[in-house]
Image: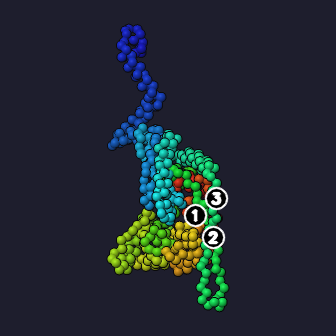
Amino acid sequence: MSYKGFINCNSRVSKEEQEFYDLKNKAAEYYRANGVPQKMEGVLNDMFFDKPDDIYGYLANYFSKFSTPPVISRLLGKEMYDGKGQLSIQAQVLCIIKNEEKTTCSAVISSHSEVLDNSFQDPSGVTNINNDKRRDSVMAALHWIDESLNTILKGSDPCDQTGVDKILSDFFMARYLEDQDIRNREKENQPPSVSVPEPSPPTAPPKDKKGGDKGKKGNSTEKPIPPPEPSELVVPGCMAIGSVSLAVAKTGALLQCIPLYKYIKSLTNQQPCPKEMHIPVPLVTLLSCGKMSPGKLNLLEEVIVIPKAGQRLKQIITMVLELQKEMMKIMNTASKTGPVLPTVSDSGALVVGYERPEQPLDLITEASNNLGLALGKGIHLAVNCAAHNLMDYPKGKYEVITGTPKSPDELVDMYEALISKYPAVVALIDPLRKEDVEQWERLSSVVGASCSLLSDISSKPQCHSTRDDAPSLPGVRGYILNQSNETTVTDLIHVTTENK
């Protein structure tokens, strides 16, 4: 006879007993609806035969298979300083994992802006103005992460990179249109300004005519350089998009217990990552003789080691460190003022001051020979020239060496001589401004057979880039990409897939 029948037939029960009886029925129904009795019976039977040493670990592993997939619970934004000491933003992802909120991953990306990154070129207070703009952009990014993005991504699957990036891109596009609308209204409200005539193109100084009419008749003017392209519009706060996207990608890799590069590979193919895969040869920055170095030489922003394929990453890093140590040893031996204090850039490169471009390349050659490295066979070099940072527009020339400006054509001649003297240099990155198309074509014709020309397009928004959007520079064999601003992981995958 049921308990209820017993109650109806024989006696009255207290209110507490009735409530307890109802509670037991609800509990039984709750566990039945979730299949707990069947699962519990099954795991207990299996565990009896398996007889594990860790009983509760066995139970935990079994039931973890049925736990709800992790979801994003919160986003946190923090102010950070990047490797260059510039204010930046860190995005942090928190997820609900097995009923607990846990911090999973964080990410910091660079913020590319011609105005902000090259502020040191303009004296007298402009740096302070640009620092204020950077801070305003960081504050906007913090607001986006802690408020809007935190709300719209709550409950999202961190392993659905495409879906998360779609939400991020749609959010950014709405902010972009708002920013455009504000700028347009500001232009409309501005009073009409009197147009100022542009300065005349720079001209070369007239040649000395000591010989009177006997001297050869030469051109007294040089062809004016093309004006710089207008810089890409950077929406304040846009670095929040790329930071959150990368943090979510790192979270997905963590939850699937695979390295980030394998996780991104699986996103590219939309299928599980193969057990074995070929990865690109890592390029390691060896030294820097750019604008921020102490010497007069500005041209070699980065000298990069290209190791021979087939080596493990640990071997390559060890080799580069040994090469740097040998270079320091050579510089200390040659120094007349005592040991040279090593200065290291944010990319881990030695910052060295020299007067001529041959000097750092000679240093690398000597260090390689001392270590028995076959420069030009076992290892090669790439040079990031960052020529767009060297143009002195009033003079119309590149300040490759302080006090020794060179025209675009003269710079091509310099590259030709360097590549001829140092055949181990097999790649030049941004050897000229993108506007100097004629010189790109000429440079390609003189060094293109032995040296690859590469172009850094990190400043271009990658949100909707296609093969046709890539800058059409003659002789360019490849492009340098870097995740910055509003570029998402999905954007990078799309661009690299389209431009294979």
Residue 64 horizontal/vertical position (percent): 43, 40
Q: Of tags 2 and 3, which is closer to the observer? A: 3
Q: Calculate the distance from the C-alpha at mark 2 to the C-alpha at mark 3.
A: 18 Å
User: Which residue matches tag 3?
Assistant: 194
Mark number, residue 128: none
Q: Earlier in the sequence, mark 2 or mark 3?
A: 3
Residue 136 is left or right of residue 337, and the answer is right
Q: Which residue is mark 2?
A: 200
Q: Position of residue 245 (x, y in %)?
A: 51, 50
Quarter of the figure with the N terminus:
top left
Q: Residue placed farthest to the top in the image?
A: 10
The answer to whether the residue labelled 2 contacts the one labelled 1, judged by CB atoms less than 8 Å apart, is no
Asked if 165 appears above or below 324 in the picture, the reply is above
Query: Is 44 in front, or is 346?
Result: 346
Q: Is the residue 38 above or below the residue 190 in the image?
A: above
Work out whether residue 485 or residue 392 is closer to the camera in this orientation and state it: 392
Does residue 225 lie above or below 22 as drawn? Answer: below
SS for callout 1: strand
> Which residue is drawn at the image coordinates 59% and 48% (left, top)?
182
Residue under the point 34% across and 78% down = 337
Q: Is residue 190 above or below residue 17?
A: below
Indicate left or right for 19 with 148 as reference.
left
- Amino acid tagged 1: Tyr
Which residue type does callout 2 highlight?
Ser
Q: Residue at x 63, y 76 (%)?
A: 222
Circle 1 crowding by C-alpha within 10 Å: few under 14, some 14–19, many from 20: some
Mark toward the start of the polypeptide (3 vs 1): 3
Q: Nearer the viewer, residue 309 or 363?
A: 363
Residue that carries the numbered disc 1 in the rendered image: 479
